[in-house]
Amino acid sequence: MILSKYNLNKINLPVSGLPDEQIFELPEKVLQFGTGVLLRGLPDYFIDKANCKSVFNGRIVVVKSTDTGSAIDFDKQDSLYTIYTKGIASGQEINEQVICSAISRVLSATIDWNAILEVAQSPHLQVIISNTTEVGIKLVKEDISKHPPVSYPGKLLAVLYKRYKAFNGSAESGLVIIPTELIIDNGKKLESIILELAHLNKLEPAFMDWLESNNRFCNSLVDRIVPGRPDKALNDEIEAKSGYTDNLSIITEPYSLWAIEGDDHIKSVLSFYEVDESVVITPDIELFRELKLRLLNGTHTLSCAWAILEGFATVKEAMADEAFIHFITPLMFNEILPAIPYKIDEKVAADFAGKVLDRFRNPYIRHEWLSISVQYTTKIKMRVIPLLLNHYKLHNAIPEHMVLGFAAFIRFMQIKLSKEGHYTGIVNNREYKVTDSFAEYFATVWQNVEPNIAIHHILTNTDLWDTDLTVLPGFKDAVIERFNSFK
């Protein structure tokens, strides 16, 4: 039995996990660019939760922007899908299953562009959400009268211009626009691209005034691991118990965060924030960015190479190892947390760090270390170097766990170009592939030189780090000592 509106009353789930029939009659308040699992597991989850509590009372029209994949499953299932939330929160195991009814329909930008422009003219529309990957938010100099425009900013500008025309530029017709792409100041960047593209298309000054005065582009930060579909064993088990099949099901971790930069007006529009404390609307989201960037991403980055060198394939495997726990816990609490270059309440930071460890322990999420290692050098530069420099500024002492993480990174990047054209490394007779924009540099550095010389070159390379790391007292010698402890 396939999941659909018709079959809802035949499904073996608690009432709390099933959508009420009245939800299907709610107006379409949100236009969402992207069908990806992050959007379906985070913003759409919150909107569905609010609708079930009669708070937001609006559904989502989803735009499928690319030609890959298809919307057939959404059509077959009336855009319903299951969200399985499994993992650890505050030491307790979480196991939740809900059928999400937030999405009303999925439209193809290529096939259904006229229908999308009709949504733009709806009096019910209030919000636009996007996740088109970081590459999606870029300026493409194009004519927005194309059917449809190529880029996401082009499509968005076309939608906004159509709306402006439909409502004669009324102030009330302005929208709240929230990109969730993982780039800093994503709202401001998208707005600047939209304004430049409007100028390039020579749109009238009155529209430009309406665009800037009555539309709100909000910076936002999303944080939730949503790997996609459950593995086959878990999926088969759940479907056997529930009595239905679902080709759109996704699994998520319990932790979630959607931090949105905004004021009381934004809160009034995004009323779904009221039903879940994980949706935070505040004038400044920098605190949340720093916590995520340093405590979650920074810890991942400094642990990644050491875990790979020790033979762990996933974060879950490493978290079951006592030696790894003895490394990662003091790294996070004693070195990273105090070195965050932002004023953060100690209790807030410690609470966030505890949640990070819960997330790392999640037995249902397969998070591979090699995936985390992609673009490793850039991640070290962005996430770790500011912490390292601030640690020395505060203590002028060697951070032994950061040193271990950095030495492991250098050992991981002891690579060469394979016959197949890939950059690879070897540890304990195991070969691994490195995906890094600086792989060629590292392969060159390691050619026919002693480790001490190679490490010196790497640490003094200001093109990599924007600073000479050998000026930090004792850091170079400590890195070399730790490096030599690896096989």
Image (spheres, rainbow, N blue to C red):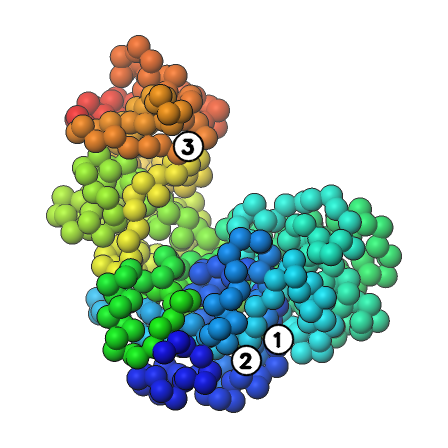
| Front of the two marks 1 and 2 | 1
Q: Three-letter amino acid code at disc 1?
A: Lys
- Residue farthest toward the left in the current orientation of the protein: 322
* SS at badge 3: loop
Relative to 60, is 297 above or below? above
Relative to 461, is 274 above or below? below
Q: Three-letter amino acid code at disc 2?
A: Phe
Question: Marks 3 and 2, how far apart in space?
Answer: 43 Å
| Front of the two marks 3 and 2 | 3
- Work out whether residue 26 or residue 466 is closer to the camera in this orientation and state it: 26
Q: Is residue 147 visible?
A: yes
Tell me, yes or no, whether the two marked residues, 1 and 2, touch with CB atoms within 8 Å: yes
Q: Which badge, 3 or 2, comes first in the chain's sequence?
A: 2
- Disc 2 designates what residue? 56
Question: Marks 1 and 2, how far apart in space?
Answer: 9 Å
Q: Residue at x 68, y 58 (%)?
A: 156
Dot 3 alpha-carbon crowd within 10 angstroms: few under 14, some 14 to 19, many 20 or more? some
- Disc 3 designates what residue? 436
Q: Which badge, 1 or 2, comes first in the chain's sequence?
A: 1
Q: Three-letter amino acid code at disc 3?
A: Asp
- Disc 1 designates what residue? 29
Dot 2 alpha-carbon crowd within 10 angstroms: few under 14, some 14 to 19, many 20 or more? many
Q: Which mark is residue 166?
A: none
* SS at badge 1: strand
Classify residue 192 as left or right of residue 301.
right
Q: Residue at x 47, y 74 (%)?
A: 77
- Work out whether residue 389 or residue 244 is closer to the camera in this orientation and state it: 244
